[in-house]
């Protein structure tokens, strides 16, 4: 008997086209920054604020890349 451990896989679908830049920014930051549920409240609030700030930066980069890609073609 052979077995393969694949790990955790999330599948997210969309209707009427692809995903938005906001979707990708959220997914990227969620993979980079995990905020534990059992953190003390002041630390948790700070971590969530940091994650939001990073999401805004990633979103800005994704939007710039899309504009650049469209201009390049």
Image: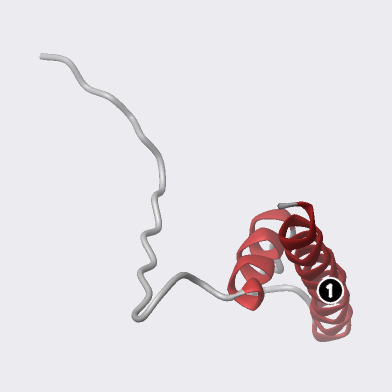
Q: Quadrant of residue 10?
A: bottom left
Q: Secondary structure at mark 1?
A: helix
Q: Residue at x 80, y 85 (%)?
A: 41
Q: Residue at x 50, y 72 (%)?
A: 19
Q: Quadrant of residue 29?
A: bottom right
Left or right: 73, with 1 as reference point: right
Question: x%, y% of residue 71?
Answer: 79, 60
In the image, farthest residue toward the top: 1
The one of 60 and 4 positioned closer to us in this rendering: 60
1 vs 21: above or below: above
In the image, farthest residue toward the front: 73
Q: Residue at x 38, y 75 (%)?
A: 14
Q: Residue at x 77, y 71 (%)?
A: 59
Question: x%, y% of residue 65?
Answer: 78, 59
The residue under label 1 is: 47
Q: Quadrant of residue 28?
A: bottom right
Left or right: 3, with 31 as reference point: left
Colouring rule applied to residues: secondary structure
46 vs 61: above or below: below
Q: Residues within 10 Å of mark 1 (few under 14, many from 20)?
A: some
Counting every numbered tag in the picture gives 1
Left or right: 50, with 19 as reference point: right
Quadrant (top left/top right/bottom left/bottom right) for the N terminus = top left
Question: x%, y% of residue 36?
Answer: 67, 68
The one of 24 and 33 positioned closer to us in this rendering: 24
The one of 5 and 21 positioned closer to us in this rendering: 21
């Amino acid at each position: 008997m052979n077995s393969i451990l694949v790990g955790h896989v999330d599948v997210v679908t969309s209707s009427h086209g692809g995903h938005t830049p906001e979707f990708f920014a959220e997914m990227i930051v969620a993979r980079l920054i995990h905020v534990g549920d059992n953190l003390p409240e002041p630390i948790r609030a700070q971590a969530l604020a940091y994650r939001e700030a990073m999401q805004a930066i990633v979103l800005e980069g994704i939007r710039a890349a899309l504009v650049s890609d469209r201009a390049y073609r």
